[in-house]
Structure formats: C-alpha cells, structure tokens
Image (cartoon, grey):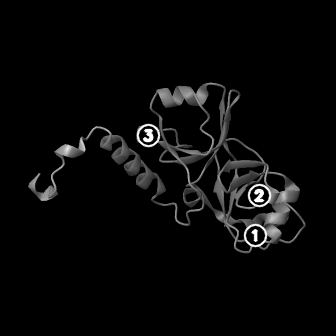
Amino acid sequence: MSSLQGHLLVASPKLADPNFFRSVVLIVQHNDDGALGLVLNRPMEPTIDSVWDQVSETPCYADGQLHKGGPCDGPLMVLHTDEEHSQIEVLEGVYFTTEKDAVEQLVADPISKPLRFFLGYAGWSAGQLEGELADNAWATTAATSEHVFLPDVEEQWDTLRRAIARAAAAEWIDPKFIPEDPSVN
C-alpha cells in the first residue's frame, strides 16, 4: 500500500471505538513501520494560552483550542503553515512539529498563521492501519489545508462521509443516463 501521509481517515459509521467514533484523522506519517495521525474533530475545553505555563516559561500569544489528537500519550503537537519551524511537511503548505523550541517560536508570533494544537495522537503499528482499511473501518480522501484548519469541526465527519459516498457513487453512474432535467427522473 502506498503512503497515506497527507490523507484523511473518515471513520465508518460502524466504527464503535469511542476514541474514533465519528472521527476525522489526518495521517501525519505513514510508512512500513506504521502510522501516526491526529484526530481533527475532537476540540477540548482548554485553550493553548490557558495551559501554556505548564509547557514553557516563554510568552504565548496564540489563543487556539487544544484538540485531543488520539488515545496515545505524547508531547504537545502543532499543525501549522510555517515551513521554518517544521519537522515534517504533512501535505503541501501544512507542517507538523513537536520540538519545544519550534513550538515556542510558533506561539510567540502567531500573527496570521493558522495553528492547531494537539494533546495525544493516534498510532498504528506496521500493517495495523492497512488491516483496518481492509475491514472498512475507515474511508480515505486527500486532505487540504482547509480540512486541517477548519474553524468549526462539528459537522466535519458527516460532511466528509457524504462527499466520499457521493464520489464513490459517481463512479457507478453513467452520465449518458442522467436526464438534462432531473425532475423527469
């Protein structure tokens, strides 16, 4: 299977695991060793500025919500658009970092830079994600920066699930059988 880095996993309606029920996961890294992803649609109550003193003594001028990135513990993780402070380019123009110095720089000067903060992550061992995909636990679609930095994530799962279903159905419909006026159908 080719890498799904930069793609979204959209949970199947039958996926009952509470960590992933109705979730949208951005795959940050995917290779033969496994995969790392961040759940995009699990905002938490605290904001980064309200908990920053637990992370660093440097000033924080960012005000974004924290998100529960998944069930695995890990450092504070940030998706952003600043190439200079990145560890990984996840998709074109969207970067990932966990390095403390880089995160401090990102929150010190957040002017007009979208930032998304995560506590925890979703992790899969070698072959595990591929098995879940074979079991139809997830649908996939290419991610965009709009998906990653969407301000209101309440409807993200349902919107993406419907878009993927429409795209799949379109492959089965021959356009020559679609009437010019759909009301005569």
* Relative vertical location of residue 99 with respect to residue 37 in this rendering, above or below: below
Please give the label number shown on residue 83: 2
| Camera-nearest residue between 142 and 46 | 142
- Amino acid carrying mark 1 in the image: Asp
State which mark lies toward you, 2 or 3: 2
User: Residue 86's image quarter?
Assistant: bottom right
- The Cα–Cα distance between marks 3 and 1, rounded to whole angstroms, is 34 Å
Mark 2 to mark 3: distance in Å? 33 Å
Q: Amino acid at mark 3?
A: Ser
Say whether marks 1 and 2 touch (CB < 8 Å): no
Mark 2, residues whose alpha carbon is within 10 Å: few (<14), some, or many (≥20)?
Answer: few
Residue occupying the point 50% across, 31% down: 133
Q: Quadrant of the N terminus?
A: top right
Q: Residue furthest right?
A: 57
Mark 3 lies on residue: 12
Task: Residue under label 1, please give it.
Answer: 49
**Type of amino acid at the residue the image marks with label 2:** Glu
